[in-house]
Amino acid sequence: MKVGVVQFKVSTKKEANLKKIITYISKASSENATLCAFPEFMMFYTNSSQTAKQLASLAETINGNFVTTIAKAAKTNHIQVIGTFYEKSRKKDRVYDTSFVIDKSGKVISTYRKIHLYDALGFRESDKMVSGSKIEKPVKTSLGKIGMMICYDLRFPEIARALAVAGSEVLVAPSAWVKGNMKEEHWITINKTRAIENGCYVIAPDQVGNIYCGRSLVVDPYGKILLDMKKKQSIDFVNIDLNKVKQTRKVLPLLKNRRIDIYPTLKA
């Protein structure tokens, strides 16, 4: 199955970004891709001067114009789409960082609210966002069973492992990985590690430009990098073979060899 991975520089203008997104979806369809995956914060770029109140005022619900327009494009182009948006929450002046999976008929079949907010290395996402409260079950797609994560979640092996144990064959992690000392090295190492330790594909579309480092990746179940988009703005394509997941988990049965009977005996 062919996957389209989008890496682009997001502007502060929601409508301008939406037009680009629709164009990328059409391009992915024309290349016979099964799924088109976008980075985190694709709705618009939030700079440091934008207040929590201003961000909240621009956020939408899952039934708002942003996701609805993308869903219509998915249906028109008969392609699955994974993306993200700022979702309104009940907490005043706070939004969810939410990803969604849309099927070929234009139906939203899964949503996931980021549970690990990036309160690290000088950033505090919790000043503008509220975290989700659960890991969503893997969703069945024509690409296989997909487990959803978002950016900073990648630094926490527990969520990837939980999704793999629940049946995920592909982990998709829309990201906006901030530039900085050793950050690209962390990014590449973590994506490869999540793939290797769970015997699954990892698809990680990343933003480029502004404060973000790019380097969108696709890693196979044995840790081989199939795609590294470096610093370019474009859509690239990778073929996913689920037999690779089965083969890897057979010869390197890490999920099967876990000693969950013993792990809980260690006390802090």
Image (cartoon, helix red, strand yellow):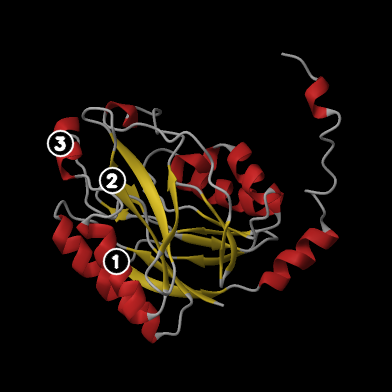
Q: For mark 2, does the 10 Å Cα neighbourhood hold few (<14), some (14 to 19), or many (20 or more) residues?
A: many
In the image, is 226 to the left or to the right of 20? Answer: right
In the image, is 229 to the left or to the right of 227? Answer: left
Labels 3 and 1: the sequence-earlier one: 3
Pointer 2 and pointer 3: residues touching (CB < 8 Å)? no
Residue under label 3: 50
Q: Amino acid at mark 2?
A: Tyr
Image location (x, y in percent) of residue 82: 41, 61
**Residue 9 visible in the current orientation:** no
Mark-to-mark CA distance, 2 and 3: 14 Å
Image location (x, y in percent) of residue 54: 13, 36
Image location (x, y in percent) of residue 123: 33, 30
Give the residue displayed 21% in from the left and 64% down from the top: 18
Q: Quadrant for the C terminus, please.
A: top right
The nearer-to-camera label among 2 and 3 is 2
**Residue 140 visible in the current orientation:** yes
Task: Out of 55 and 223, give the one closest to the viewer.
Answer: 55
The nearer-to-camera label among 3 and 1 is 1
Which image quadrant for residue 26? bottom left
Q: Amino acid at mark 1?
A: Ile
What SS does tag 1 mark?
Answer: helix
In the image, is 195 to the left or to the right of 111? Answer: right
What SS does tag 3 mark?
Answer: loop
Labels 2 and 1: the sequence-earlier one: 1
Image location (x, y in percent) of residue 157: 61, 39
- Mark seen at residue 205: none
Residue under label 2: 86
Q: For mark 1, does the 10 Å Cα neighbourhood hold few (<14), some (14 to 19), or many (20 or more) residues?
A: many
- Mark seen at residue 70: 1
Q: For mark 3, does the 10 Å Cα neighbourhood hold few (<14), some (14 to 19), or many (20 or more) residues?
A: few
